[in-house]
Amino acid sequence: MRRTLTALALVATAATVAPTALEAQLSDTCWLRPGRDSPEQLAERASPKTSLEFTLGGETATFCYGSPSVRGRTMFGDTEPYDRAWRMGADEASAIYLPFGGDIGGVEVGPGSYSLMAVPGEESFEIIVNSQVERWGVPITPEVRANDVGSFTRPVTRLDDSVERLTFSFESHGENMGHLVMEWQHTRVEIPIHRGM
């Protein structure tokens, strides 16, 4: 089963959603930098704030990220250099909200909120699970990395067709397990998530 993403701050919705309603919708789901972006500015972001909900064991988790576009650039190995920590999105730190304990790629986690970062490589990505969530995504300093819970490595799959906008989806592999799937340009990386029993 493949769940698709829900865009929360797309320009297309800005004309039909009152600013106060848009702001409430975002604040109920994903952390936003306080006091810096009006609802109108959120709707005009080049990288819309986006969320993905998925269910494991009957409980719903949420992943929040800024969704940048390629816009003619080479992303991994150039705009996002290899071997340097990346926030896995744009703007605020990319964050996963789990109502259950379990593991992310083998890194044990309790119920709660975690940011996800990556160190891209040509053949594999190191995925980092971090306990600091409510922050702007860069810079990724030693102080930020001091909050790492753990990390793991996942292989890169090359896509024939280019994906213009950074996209995350969820692929279920049973009631208590699935993969958070990142696709961008010609890169696909799957992040296993298990719900504890």
Image (cartoon, rainbow, N blue to C red):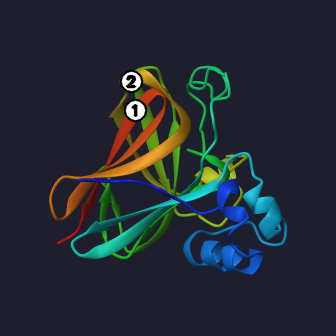
Q: Residue at x 44, y 36 (%)?
A: 183
Q: Residue at x 30, y 59 (%)?
A: 103
Q: Tell us which disc is closer to us: 2 or 1.
A: 2
Nearer-N-terminus badge (2/1): 2
Q: Amino acid at mark 2?
A: Leu
Residues packed near mark 1 inside 10 Å, few (<14), some (14 to 19) or many (20 plus): some
Q: Residue at x 75, y 52 (%)?
A: 45
Left or right of 139, for residue 162: left
x and y percentages locating residue 121 in the rendered image: 48, 25
Q: Is residue 86 above or below residue 79?
A: below
What separation in Å lies between label 2 and label 1 (alpha carbons)?
A: 7 Å
Q: Report whether residue 61 is seen.
A: yes
Left or right of 22, for residue 50: left
Front residue of this view, candidates 18 and 87: 18
Q: Which residue is mark 2?
A: 159
Q: Residue at x 30, y 68 (%)?
A: 55
Residues packed near mark 2 inside 10 Å, few (<14), some (14 to 19) or many (20 plus): few
Q: Which residue is mark 1?
A: 188
x and y percentages locating residue 192 in the rendered image: 29, 49
Q: Report whether residue 10 is seen.
A: no
Say which quadrant the C terminus sits in. Answer: bottom left
Q: Quadrant of residue 188?
A: top left
x and y percentages locating residue 89 in the rendered image: 59, 46
Question: Pointers 2 and 1 in contact (CB under 8 A)?
Answer: yes
Q: Quadrant of residue 7?
A: bottom right
Q: Residue furthest front?
A: 16
Q: Amino acid at mark 1?
A: Arg
Front residue of this view, candidates 191 and 166: 166
x and y percentages locating residue 123 in the rendered image: 40, 21
User: Considering the numbered disc 2 on the image, is that residue within a helix, a strand or a loop?
Assistant: strand
User: Considering the numbered disc 1 on the image, is that residue within a helix, a strand or a loop?
Assistant: strand
